[in-house]
Image (tube, rainbow, N blue to C red):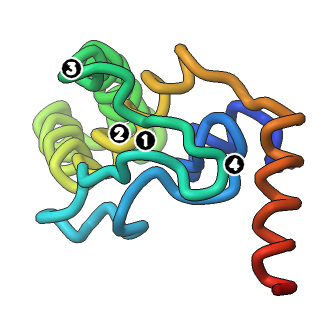
Amino acid sequence: MIRKGMKLYSILFGACPKCHLESMYTVKNPYVLSDTLKINEKCSHCSTKYRMEPSFFYGSMYVSYGVGVAFAVAAFITSFVIFESSILLAFISIVLTLIGFMPIIMRLSRNIWINLFMSYDKVLARKAKNAASNNLNT
């Protein structure tokens, strides 16, 4: 089970890598193409800056290549090996998969990239959660 506190949680759901209490993205739906890569400046709970330096996320392009290859291999195995389609149909399924999952691949790559440099902090998350609950109580 994937739960808060696991690096995989932050990667899959785009949560703050330090506290996991909110999404890094302004719009949760990656298929709103105009807002796919719009990211908050910092976490409203723990104040973690998501952009550690200008052009920080350029490195995620390298991760994107690997994630895209993984999606392409999955599409190939599904179409060519499991459904025993022709090589042309397998190629078409790879292209359609990469186009269809492009927003998810881009976000997933950014999530992986930022999680290479930041880790979940239990103490910070507890403080942020307590502060958020105190704000709700007042």
Q: Amino acid at mark 4?
A: His
Residue 20: give its label.
4
Instruction: Report the side of 19 relative to 53 (left or right).
Output: right
Residue at horizontal 47 percent and vertical 26 percent from the top: 114
**Residue under numbered circle 2:** 75
Q: Nearer the viewer, residue 96 or 115?
A: 115
Q: Nearer the viewer, mark 4 or mark 1?
A: 4
Q: Report the residue at 79% width, 30% height from top.
A: 121
Tell which of 101 and 3 is nearer to you. Answer: 3
Give the amino acid at mark 2. Answer: Ala
Measured in 3D between alpha carbons, the distance from the residue under mark 2 to the one under mark 1, in whole angstroms, is: 5 Å
Q: Give the x, y percent position of residue 56.
A: 28, 21
Q: Residue 78, which numbered label?
A: 1
Q: Alpha carbon of mark 2 to alpha carbon of mark 4: how far?
A: 31 Å
Looking at the picture, does residue 120 appear above or below residue 104? above
Which residue, given by chain and number where applicable, does mark 3 sit on? 58
The answer to whether marks 4 and 1 mark residues whose Cβ atoms lie closer than 8 Å is no
| Distance (Cα) linking label 3 and label 2 | 26 Å
Task: Using a 10 Å C-alpha cutoff, classify the residue at mark 4 as few (fewer than 14 neighbours), some (14 to 19) or many (20 or more).
Answer: many
Report, in whole angstroms, how far the alpha carbon at label 4 lies from the one at label 3: 23 Å
Q: Are marks 2 and 1 in contact (CB under 8 Å)?
A: yes
Task: Give the percent coordinates (x, y) of residue 39.
Answer: 32, 50
Instruction: Indicate the amino acid at tag 3.
Output: Tyr
Q: Which mark is residue 70?
A: none
Q: Earlier in the sequence, mark 1 or mark 3?
A: 3
* Structural crowding at the residue carrying mark 3, measured as other residues with C-alpha within 10 Å and reported as few (<14), some (14–19) or many (≥20): few
Q: Quadrant of residue 69?
A: top left
Going by the numbered disc 1, the residue's amino acid type is Thr
Q: Which mark sits nearer the N-terminus, 4 or 1?
A: 4
